[in-house]
Amino acid sequence: MSEKTTHFGFQTVAEEAKQKKVAEVFSSVAQKYDVMNDLMSMGLHRLWKAFAIQVSGVRDGDRVLDVAGGTADLSLAFARKVGKRGQVWLTDINHAMLSRGRDRVVDAGHPLPVAQCNAERLPFPDDWFDCVTVAFGLRNMTHKDAALAEMRRVLRPGGRLLVLEFSRVWKPLSPLYDLYSFKILPWMGKKVANDADSYRYLAESIRMHPGQEELKALMEQAGLARVDYFNLSAGVVALHRGYKI
């Protein structure tokens, strides 16, 4: 029987190898992750995340799950929204990234519950969270369909899933975006994080990730309803939203 394969950027790898390769990328960039986010997006990632918080509708007392939460940008913002009566879980599969996030939330005075876990097998009960978010993490997951189904499972009826992710840029901008992605971004990664390869993978993984309509269809296939999306920065990023009915 042939071994199942998937993509790691533009490479074809065995399914079981992808998780290890992705882990190596994020362990490598964890220390410079926040600095590089600001540099490579020119600070726009903060606006994209602020928009996701606004669209989420999260309010005082809600329960929120931040999947692939990394260095906790969204978790911290949600913690301020839900207040003392609410709860925000910060999760990530990568220990180095999760450690950075844990330290940030503690330093900010929000000692949130933290769990290292695989999004394809979430350790939470059914129908528990009012809102689940995944920001710039879905494209790194081996089985996106399984991860989306798990996120839907842990949502309460009426709860919503938000997926903030790189997407398909407006076509007239594609040549300029490609130049930036495949030339400037790896150069920046080398200079700042001493790691050109990880940022080359980032550019490749964006191209391999489903576009706006394809991701919408995936979310619907996972059982989410009323799925819509918002293009941000000419489609460089899209925010998808779906509900558990």
Image (spheres, rainbow, N blue to C red):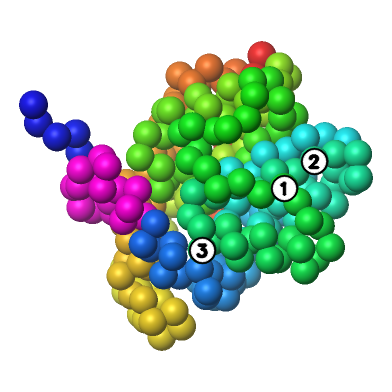
Crowd class of label 2 (few under 14; some 14 to 19; many from 20; radius 10 Å): many
- Determine if residue 14 is in view: yes
Q: Earlier in the sequence, mark 1 or mark 3?
A: 3
- Residue at x 23%, y 53% (from the top left corner): 10
Asked if labels 2 and 1 touch by Cβ distance under 8 angstroms, the answer is: yes
Taking the spot 41% from the left edge, 70% from the top edge, the residue there is: 28
User: Which image quarter: residue 84?
Assistant: top right
Q: Amino acid at mark 3?
A: Ala
In terms of secondary structure, where does tag 3 sit? Answer: helix
Residue 48 in percent (x, y) is at: 64, 54
The numbered mark at residue 113 is: 1
Callout 1: SS: loop
Q: At 60% across and 18% down in the image, what residue appears?
A: 225
Vertical position of residue 131 compared to residue 177: above or below: above
- The stretch of residues the image draws in magenta is 7-22
Q: Nearer the viewer, mark 1 or mark 2?
A: 1
Name the residue type under label 2: Gln
- Image quarter hosting the C terminus: top right
Say which residue appears at 70% left-offset and 66% top-offset.
104
Badge 3: how crowded within 10 Å, few (<14), some, or many (20+)?
many
At label 1, which amino acid type do we have?
Answer: Pro
Q: Which residue is mark 3?
A: 96
Instruction: Kindly identify which residue carries mark 2.
Output: 87
How far apart marks 1 and 3 lie (CA) works out to 16 Å
Q: Report x, y in % for residue 111.
A: 78, 56
Residue 64 part of the magenta segment: no
Looking at marks 1 and 2 on the same chain, the residue that comes earlier in the sequence is marked by: 2
Q: Is residue 95 above or below residue 185?
A: above
